[in-house]
Amino acid sequence: MNRRSRVGASLATITGFLVGITAVLSLLLGDNPALFGDGAGADALAQNFALPGAVLLRLLVIVLALSIVFGIANLLILHTRRVVSGRLMSGVLLASFAGTIGWHITQRGDLSLLETIQLPIESALAALLCVTLVAGGARILTRRSDIWGILFVLVVVVVLLGSLPLPELAPIAALSDWLLRIPVQAGARAILLGIALGSIVVGVRALLGQDRSLRG
Amino acid sequence: MPENTLALISFVLTLMVFSYLLGDLPLIRHLYRIAVYIFIGTSAAFTLIVGYESLLLPFWEDVQNPATSWTALGAQADQLIFFTGLLFAALLLLKPVARLGWLTNSILAVVVVMGAAVGVVGALRGTLLPLLEATARLPALDADLGSLLESLLVLLGTLTALFSFHYQATASDGGGYGLGKVFRTIGKALIVTALGAIYASTILSSLTILTERIAFLFQYGA
């Protein structure tokens, strides 16, 4: 890494750190007058604390919105190149994109295209998920037939059977209800706590400039 | 467009997606890919429309109207924020230019760090603190024994499941039969149970959608 790159990386780290600390403090403390006592100026102080966070958030939203526009432009350029090189399937994508934009411009406020194309394909893909999930669940027993694989499949079967409205399956429904109320709740809470702790660690790493993308 | 034509398009697109189940047959295999390409094209277009009409256009109208100010800082501050955002986004396009790396990296740092700040605050306020509060909260002492026991089991279960994530829980017991291994096994069982239930719930949700799609196909076919 040459001197110019090192200076650049340091500048990015310092900028990121200052902006990040300002944003975290502002988002945590702002708009919470209780933190600033009962005095007459507590509301104003809380609003002042919230201001930098709100300004930075709006800046972020504008940059992200434009990044999405650039991303879509990149997608279109890529598929145009593919059409030119003879891969006609990309033409379908470009045509559907152009058709949707054209429809929106000519038929303002009409959502029938969304209901006719977008929703059926989305629902059909989500419906396909059912088949692949069931096939995947069955494959677990052949690929991994240890105690954990068996427990996993057993829980899946109990929860699925427990959801059926059949009086003959009342004991299984009761077992499924107990499973969901205690072991699943405990496990899910631990998973969510793990995700939250992981997010905080990754976020703090980025705030401290330890993220590789900031160092160039 | 007539309603029947719209329904026919939905019908055909649904069948094209379901053709995936027929496997790698000649001609048929292209139907699924065509449907997916149509989906990506329309999704990109709708994302662009929503991004423009719900984010950029309202901000632009806000900037153009000097009578309203989004912050207490005044209309000029709104303009400054908007144009700084535009400038930042435009400068991000210069990322491939190596000589301007110091500038584009600094702007990228602001974007990444802001995302990280929102993530940290969201995880703290939205997940960590409420979940810790809910887990540690014991029922009132006059509650029945059942609910007291349930709360205690959930608390112990959450602790053992968290313990099973811990590095030392796997490294220190060395395959022995210590208390650590018992906690880890119980914790792992709870995690597997939770994942199984989530898997089953996903199957149930997709099954509901599958039923709706099949009902639509039969309804239109009839």
Image: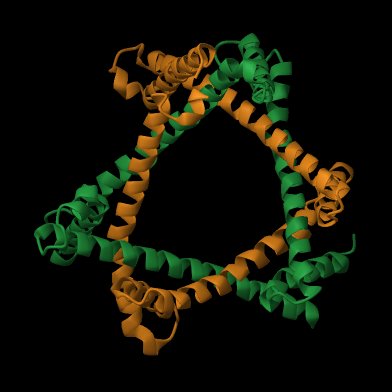
Chain colours: A orange, B green
The reply, left or right, for residue B131 in relation to residue B201 is left
- Above/below status of B133 relative to B13: above
Find residue A46 and report its horizontal and vertical position in percent. 39, 18
Q: Residue at x 46, y 15 (%)?
A: A10
Can residue A52 be seen here? The reply is yes
Find residue B144 and report its horizontal and vertical position in percent. 15, 64
Find residue B122 and report its horizontal and vertical position in percent. 42, 37
Q: Residue extending furthest front?
A: A2
Rendering quarter of residue B56? top right
Rendering quarter of residue B21? bottom right
Q: Residue at x 49, y 14 (%)?
A: A11
- Above/below status of B67 relative to B195: above
Can residue B125 be seen here? The reply is no
Find residue A113 and report its horizontal and vertical position in percent. 80, 55
Q: Residue extending furthest bottom?
A: A168
Q: Nearer the viewer, residue A169 or B200?
A: B200
The reply, left or right, for residue B23 in relation to residue B121 is right
Q: Residue extending furthest left?
A: B178
